[in-house]
């Protein structure tokens, strides 16, 4: 059974840090593919600088197209809001019963994982791949030595979408931070200015 890692994010915009982490997980873990799940704009929390769903999907598509093991995923666009990871996992399992889905999260998310809706069920049915953060985080005891939780050696990327948006707005060169086709689309569409 093919094992798919789910990497969630708003990807506003999708940058080389996201790409490096996703590719590292695809190449250095037993995950066969990484699906980049684009989190939809919440109808309850309108953010002025959050690009519409289809534009963020296009950015992820453009960045990942050359990578056979990386795929954009819009499953959450079709689900009712507010959205919960457990519902997304159930939806993916229904539509792809032949695939095994795993979650990808940062260490900071693992600290609060016990507060997630249906976290016990998620942990019972899915592996979790944890990416380190720059500051060392104490992993809660209940998640230590759990065979379903895999701490990865993914590179720590200190690049933020917020910083990139600010740089674009102030006319700075962001080319090194974005895959070139992503930058072309942002520039052509005049986003974040």
Image (tube, grey):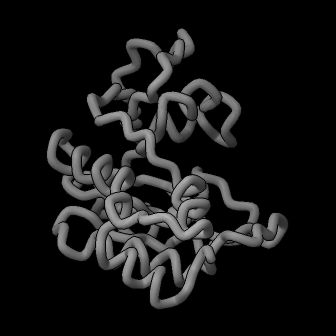
Residue 90 in view: no
Position above or below: 33 against 151? below
The N terminus lies in quadrant: bottom left
Name the quarter where the C terminus is drawn.
Answer: bottom right
Q: Residue at x 45, y 29 (%)?
A: 133
Asked if residue 173 shows in the view, the reply is yes
Q: Residue at x 52, y 89 (%)?
A: 189
Give the residue at x 51% y 63%: 11
Q: Is residue 109 left or right of residue 106?
A: right
The image quadrant of residue 29 is top left
109 w.r.t. 137: above or below: below
| Quadrant of the image occupied by residue 118 | top right
Q: Residue 143's x, y, as percent? A: 49, 18
Give the camera-side residue of 31 and 16: 16
Q: In the figure, is residue 182 to the left or right of 55?
A: left
Q: Position of residue 187 (x, y in %)?
A: 46, 83
- Farthest-out residue, right: 44
Q: Is residue 117 left or right of residue 44?
A: left
Q: How many numbered tags mark residues here?
A: 0
Depth check: give the residue in front, 160 or 172. Answer: 172
Taking depth in this image into account, of 33 and 187 the one nearest to the observer is 187
- Residue 159's place in the image compared with 137, above or below, is below
Q: Residue at point 16% right, 40% down?
A: 28
Q: Spot the residue most to the top.
A: 141
Extreme bottom residue here? Answer: 188
The picture places residue 80, in percent across and down from the top left corner, at: 71, 71
Report x, y in % for residue 4: 30, 55
Quadrant position of residue 79? bottom right
């Amino acid at each position: 059974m093919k094992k798919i890692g789910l990497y969630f994010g708003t990807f506003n915009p999708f940058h080389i840090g996201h790409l490096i982490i996703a590719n590292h997980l695809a190449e250095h873990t037993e995950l066969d593919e990484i699906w980049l799940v684009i989190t939809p704009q919440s109808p309850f929390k309108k953010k002025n600088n959050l690009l519409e769903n289809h534009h963020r999907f296009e950015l992820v598509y453009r960045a990942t197209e050359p990578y056979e093991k990386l795929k954009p995923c819009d499953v959450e666009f079709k689900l009712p809001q507010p959205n919960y990871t457990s519902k997304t996992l159930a939806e993916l399992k229904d539509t792809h019963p032949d695939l095994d889905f795993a979650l990808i999260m940062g260490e900071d998310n693992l600290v609060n994982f016990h507060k997630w809706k249906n976290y016990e069920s998620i942990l019972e049915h899915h592996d979790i791949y944890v990416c380190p953060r720059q500051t060392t985080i104490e992993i809660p005891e209940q998640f230590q030595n759990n065979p379903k939780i895999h701490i990865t050696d993914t590179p720590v990327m200190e690049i933020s979408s917020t910083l990139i948006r600010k740089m674009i707005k102030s006319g700075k060169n962001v080319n090194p931070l974005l895959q070139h086709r992503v930058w072309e689309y942002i520039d052509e569409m005049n986003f974040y200015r």
